[in-house]
Amino acid sequence: MADEIRILVIDDDDSGREALTLLLQSVGYTVLSAANGKDALDIIAREHFQIIVSDLFLPDSSGFDILQSVRKVSSSTEIIVVTGHASAQTAVKAMKEGAFDYITKPIDFDELKIVVAKALEKQQLLSENVYLRKQLQGRFEFSNIIGSSPAMQLVFERMRRIVKTDSTILITGESGTGKELVARALHYNSNRKDRPFIAVNCGAIPEALLESELFGHVKGAFTGAISDKPGKFEAANHGTIFLDEIGTMPLHLQTKLLRVLQEHEVERVGSNKPVKLHVRVVSATNIDLELKVKQGEFREDLFYRLNVIPLHLPPLRERKLDIMPLVGYFLAKYCQLMSRPLMTVSKQVLEIMEQYAWPGNVRELENLIERMVALSDGTVITYEDVPAGIVGGKRGRAGFSLDLTEDGVDLAAILSEIERNLIIQALKLSGGIRAKASALLGINRTTMVEKIKRLKIEI
């Protein structure tokens, strides 16, 4: 049967071995037994066991020999050692050799059942972890990222080249182009794929908390620091850290980040003890970092450190060939999530989508498909299901037009009103986080604060 639990009992004491076998069989496990190391190793070579319960001292070998032999053929089998010669040193050595746990003679059967159950629980968690990791790796394979247009094929070609390196990568592109998706794909197709991938949105974390979030802190470093806490860099050690909206990072933290990149170590807030790092740094931005460097708002030396390998993602309006397959993918996704029959879009709707400028890029397209699947009655999305703002088709990125009459206009007032409305929208979208709102508008945080005051915007 598929969920059969197989256990091997190894003990040279006939009565003890029989008692253990009967106990474990009574719980519902399939149990085999061996009286010595040689017989045990012969059985292990032929059959697989989830659990091995072995006496630590056998007439022809030791439990340590069993441990080493099992580890050569199976990394998943858990070993519980039994000894009548209990000592701290024996226990520590057994655990170092790879034993899950140990119990002492005379055996407490209730204790043994608990230890076996815990070992099986650990196996289940490890199995689920391996399954989920494989699912993630499959999801982020390059072949599963939609993009048949020439622009995206160039991106994929570059990704395949850089995935083999550990150099820092700077991903640029408008909001909604899929920068985090690409960062995850780079990680899960690299030799770090079995290590952590940690994503940090630098624009979504309040400035006062960002340093601690990235670099960690020690107990007492500041009010509320009641215990030591590792930061995101330590969490990502031996894996990949993805720093999204890197352009919003304050200058004083840019200095600390530069040191991390140069020295490959991090110091927690309140500590001068460095922690060594071996982590790949992938950052992303939707603003012009070179312009911010010229304006003195981003460190030039940090920019060069981050931009060792640049990777630019084209906006959706420059990859119109990808719209149809993206629509198909999102339709399948949301029809499944909402338990609806698979829907399609009419030819007219597809033409509208191909004419539209998509200022929000792939994210905007996905949100639109989700909305239409939720609100449409039939199985075909028609012209009537498309929001009016999309039907305009050739709308520019800002979606704004104004006719000038002979009477003229108050240009300053109009521009102020446009500016005011956009800032209010950005603040709403960012949940009131000014750093994130400024990133949405392509301005720095200081400029944002000045505009809020000048335009008398209430937050």
Image: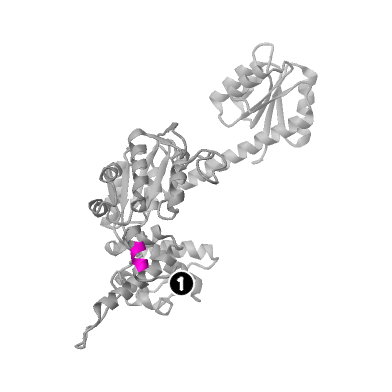
Q: Is residue 349 left or right of residue 112?
A: left
Q: Which residues are magenta?
A: 448-453
Q: Which three-letter amino acid code belongs to the residue tagged 1?
A: Met
Q: Residue furthest left?
A: 406
Q: Is residue 322 above or below residue 270?
A: below
Say if 295 sits above or below 78 in the image. Answer: below
Badge 1 local density, few (<14 within 10 Å), some, or many (20+)? some
* Quadrant housing the C terminus: bottom left
* Numbered circles on residues, count: 1
Judged left or right of residue 261, residue 10 is right
Q: Which residue occupies 44% across, 44% down?
A: 214
- The vertical placement of 39 against 135, above or below, is above
Q: Quadrant of residue 446?
A: bottom left
Estimate the x, y position of residue 2 in percent, counting from the top left: 64, 41
Magenta run includes residue 150: no
Please provide percent x and percent y for residue 63: 65, 18
Q: Nearer the viewer, residue 10 or 374?
A: 374
Q: Quadrant of the N terminus?
A: top right
Q: Which is nearer the eye, 55 or 304?
A: 304
Q: Residue at label 1?
A: 372
The answer to whether residue 155 is left or right of residue 78 is: left
Residue shown at the point (58%, 32%) measured from the top left: 76
Residue 365, image x, y percentages: 39, 66
Say which residue appears at 30% left-offset and 60% top-offset. 315
